[in-house]
């Protein structure tokens, strides 16, 4: 369905995502789809990060999104800086193709993107940021808001970036909008200043929910949830959630998602007690579960760096049904207790087929996952 602005109207809904699951259930394992309490999400999602900003890559990414949705993945992830906005535009083309062909409906797809990283190519990105956001006389953005010459979560900047993302995607509503690597700001401000800024930008995001521009929001991080509280770039998830609740006032806040790396080489999200919930030290996945926040994994197969690197002892534990190291790595990540979906970047048809063959495979049980994690830790520690 197209809105009056020619943008695609609607958003992911409980009814739509359940309909998607029912249509694909015959080809998928019983636990491939997971409930968020409202939406139904595939345990594997497609990422759109890597590639050159050119038409050839555009066509590959758009086709990959279409084919992934055909094969049972209804979680689609992008960011405004991916290929300097071309990532989002490719996703937008794919969504339109799917809807026009009748292969999917807008309410079946969980479309996620991020803002906070400057989406302009180097070496002129700092000048671009200054001209676009600092120089205008009515702007309250300063160069001090640009962390490490690349990251900004100033409310005015995020508001504008969100509007650009909606235009790039060609949709009226983004299902999950993340602040992208917000912990980078902690490199130059004290924690209290950071959380005050988080409050200000959460006000913008809650306003965007009311305006129908987004349905949910969250934090997409690199280090913030994998490091101990003593580290400078650590984010306290409970504190962030509490701020969202205060901003939302007498209604339920929409801070409901986080994204972070999780893979066989980076298992901190399940191993390290980086968060405190009611006085108890727990992993970030446990903390998210207790706080009513859904976790999505990025870098699920280490950008294919696992190929040929998984020791036989660990590879054999996955059984004979998984033929490749990429499948084994993705199976490990998607099986993490408390994880909603594992993202994997895909452009080549053979990789889409390889990765989404897992949709028909049940995930690892908690005990098997723990045994594998113990073995992986031994390898990482050189034992």
Image: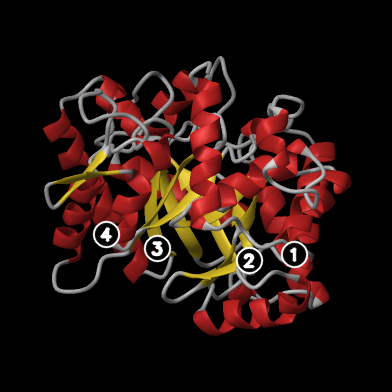
Q: How crowded is mark 4: few (under 14 residues within 10 Å), some or many (20 or more)?
A: some
Residue 131 visible, this angle: yes
State the separation of the CA atoms marked 4 and 2: 23 Å
**Quarter of the view holding residue 306:** top right
Instruction: Give the residue number, with chain letter if any, for mark 1.
Output: 360
Instruction: Give the residue number, with chain letter if any, for mark 4.
Output: 291
Task: Answer with mark 3 or mark 1, whichever residue precedes in sequence.
Answer: 3
Residue drawn at the location 69% of the way across and 46% of the way down: 318
Task: Answer with mark 4 or mark 2, whichever residue precedes in sequence.
Answer: 2
Residue drawn at the location 42% of the way across and 34% of the way down: 268
Q: How crowded is mark 3: few (under 14 residues within 10 Å), some or many (20 or more)?
A: many
Residue drawn at the location 59% of the way across and 55% of the way down: 364
Task: Answer with mark 2 or mark 3, whichever residue precedes in sequence.
Answer: 2
SS under mark 2: loop
Q: Nearer the viewer, residue 186 or 291?
A: 291
State the separation of the CA atoms marked 2 and 3: 22 Å
Residue drawn at the location 15% of the way across and 26% of the way down: 190
State the separation of the CA atoms marked 3 and 1: 29 Å
Residue 315, above or below 91: above
Residue 216, above or below 105: above
State the separation of the CA atoms marked 4 and 3: 15 Å
Instruction: Give the residue number, with chain letter if any, for mark 3.
Output: 216
Task: Answer with mark 4 or mark 1, whichever residue precedes in sequence.
Answer: 4
Residue 133, above or below 9: above
Instruction: Give the residue number, with chain letter if any, for mark 2.
Output: 32
Given this view, does label 4 or label 1 mark the residue nearer the observer? 1
Q: Nearer the viewer, residue 330 or 53?
A: 330
Task: Answer with mark 4 or mark 3, whichever residue precedes in sequence.
Answer: 3
Cβ–Cβ under 8 Å for marks 1 and 2: yes
């Amino acid at each position: 369905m197209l809105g009056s602005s020619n943008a695609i109207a609607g958003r992911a809904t409980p009814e739509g995502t359940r309909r998607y699951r029912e249509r694909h259930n015959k080809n998928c394992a019983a636990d491939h789809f997971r409930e968020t309490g409202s939406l139904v999400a595939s345990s594997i999602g497609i990422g759109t990060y890597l590639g050159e900003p050119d038409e050839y890559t555009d066509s590959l990414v758009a086709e990959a999104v279409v084919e992934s949705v055909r094969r049972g993945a209804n979680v689609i992830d992008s960011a405004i800086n991916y290929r300097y906005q071309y990532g989002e535009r490719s996703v937008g083309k794919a969504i339109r193709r799917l809807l026009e062909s009748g292969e999917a409906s807008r309410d079946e797809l969980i479309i996620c993107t991020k803002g906070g990283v400057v989406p302009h190519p180097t070496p002129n990105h700092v000048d671009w940021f200054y001209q676009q956001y600092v120089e205008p006389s009515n702007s309250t953005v300063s160069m001090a808001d640009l962390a490490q010459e690349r990251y900004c979560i100033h409310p005015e900047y995020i508001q504008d970036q969100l509007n650009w993302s909606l235009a790039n995607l060609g949709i009226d509503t983004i299902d999950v909008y993340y602040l992208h690597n917000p912990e980078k700001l902690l490199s130059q401000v004290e924690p209290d200043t950071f959380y005050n800024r988080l409050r200000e930008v959460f006000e913008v995001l809650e306003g965007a929910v009311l305006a129908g521009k987004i349905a949910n929001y969250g934090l997409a991080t690199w280090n913030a949830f994998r490091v101990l509280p003593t580290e400078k770039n650590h984010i306290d998830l409970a504190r962030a959630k509490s701020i969202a609740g205060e901003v939302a006032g007498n209604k339920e806040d929409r801070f409901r998602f986080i994204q972070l790396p999780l893979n066989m080489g980076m298992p901190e999200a399940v191993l390290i007690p980086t968060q405190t919930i009611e006085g108890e030290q727990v992993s970030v996945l446990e903390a998210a579960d207790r706080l009513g926040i859904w976790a999505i994994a990025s870098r699920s197969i280490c950008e294919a760096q696992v190929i040929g690197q998984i020791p036989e002892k660990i590879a054999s534990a996955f059984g004979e049904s998984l033929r490749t190291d990429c499948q084994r790595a993705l199976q490990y990540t998607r099986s993490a207790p408390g994880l909603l979906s594992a993202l994997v970047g895909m452009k080549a048809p053979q990789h889409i087929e390889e990765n989404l063959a897992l949709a028909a495979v049940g995930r690892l049980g908690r005990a098997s996952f723990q045994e594998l994690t113990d073995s992986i830790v031994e390898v990482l520690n050189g034992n």
